Image (cartoon, helix red, strand yellow):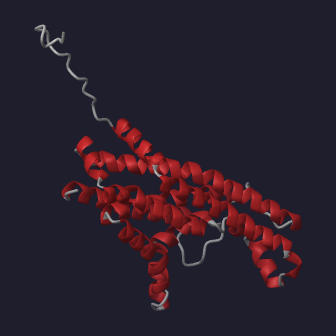
Amino acid sequence: MSAAAGGGELAPRPQWRITQARVALSEWTKLRSLRSTRWALFVTVLLTIGIGLLVCGIFSARWNQLSFQDQLRIRRNPLMHSLAGVGLAQLAVGVLGVLVITGEYTTGMIRSTFCAVPRRLPVLWAKAAVFAAVTFAVSLPAVLIAFFGGQGFLSSHHIQIAFSHPGVARAVIGAALFLTVMGLFGLGLGAIVRHTAGGIVTFVGIIFVLPPILGLLPTSWSNAINPYLPSTAGDVIWTIRPDAHTLAPWAGFAVFCAWAAAALAVAALLMVRRDT
């Protein structure tokens, strides 16, 4: 006999309080269950390690056939060749950042998410935190393997650079930080646009298309604007020999973080004002 039929009271259903930690756990479950996450992170690791080792291996194998100018260029900055894959890996990370948020809008799952978390903003913060943690956890081992493996190839000609050399540790770890913030920038753009194709096009346009276009401007204008673009500002953190017309490594990284923070701030503002 039921409790209601016997005159008893039904036991109240447990009420689960919405906390940031529980929202983050939910976002982690969603992130790791997506096939696109696994593929994008795999491509990120493959490009970071594979291209770095390939470039250093080719230079080592063809060292005696290289011109004196090419040999001198490699000797001046051997780190650059170990981290050659980072420049392409940023595309995979940025696209994944876009997909993390636009995928829910495409499938309509975002409605269920916002029904569970009506305040909405904890969802964005949880997505950003979980995505940043996963990206950094994957990127850091990849850049370390690329660095030590690449320098291992170059050591056969005694042109390697030590991890303890001034600026190298900052550049190697900075490459992982760069990829992490690049992914957050993509996530912010995706949350603003709310459309996968539009978010990816916007990301590619800002990161890869805008800098060459600015190169068509007068040199004085280009030199004044270019250091503050997201890609240019972020790049200096993972180099030990930045160009003359760029910001200092940590200053440039701060500007890059400001771009990502601005994208997430605009996304947060729109998220609470727009319908799903």
- Horizontal side of residue 195 vs 217, given as left or right: left
Q: Position of residue 134 (x, y in %)?
A: 51, 48
Q: Is residue 11 above or below residue 274?
A: above
Does the rendering let one see residue 222? Answer: yes
Does the rendering let one see residue 265? Answer: no
Q: Is residue 205 above or below residue 121?
A: below
- Horizontal side of residue 6 vs 85, given as left or right: left
Q: Position of residue 46 (x, y in %)?
A: 64, 60
Which picture quadrant has residue 86? bottom right
Q: Residue at x 80, y 73 (%)?
A: 59
**Which residue sits furthest front?**
1
Q: Is residue 126 above or below residue 187?
A: above
Q: Is residue 16 above or below residue 152?
A: above
Q: Position of residue 98 (x, y in %)?
A: 41, 62
Q: Residue at x 85, y 72 (%)?
A: 61
Q: Position of residue 50 (x, y in %)?
A: 69, 63
- Horizontal side of residue 79 vs 261, given as left or right: right
Q: How many marks?
A: 0
Q: Between 181 and 109, which is closer to the camera in this rendering?
A: 109
Q: Between 136 and 259, which is closer to the camera in this rendering?
A: 136
Q: Residue at x 88, y 64 (%)?
A: 156
Which picture quadrant has residue 166? bottom right
Image quadrant where one finds the C terminus:
bottom left
Image quadrant where one finds the N terminus:
top left
Which picture quadrant has residue 88? bottom right
**Which residue sits furthest left?**
7
Q: Between 159 and 62, which is closer to the camera in this rendering?
A: 62
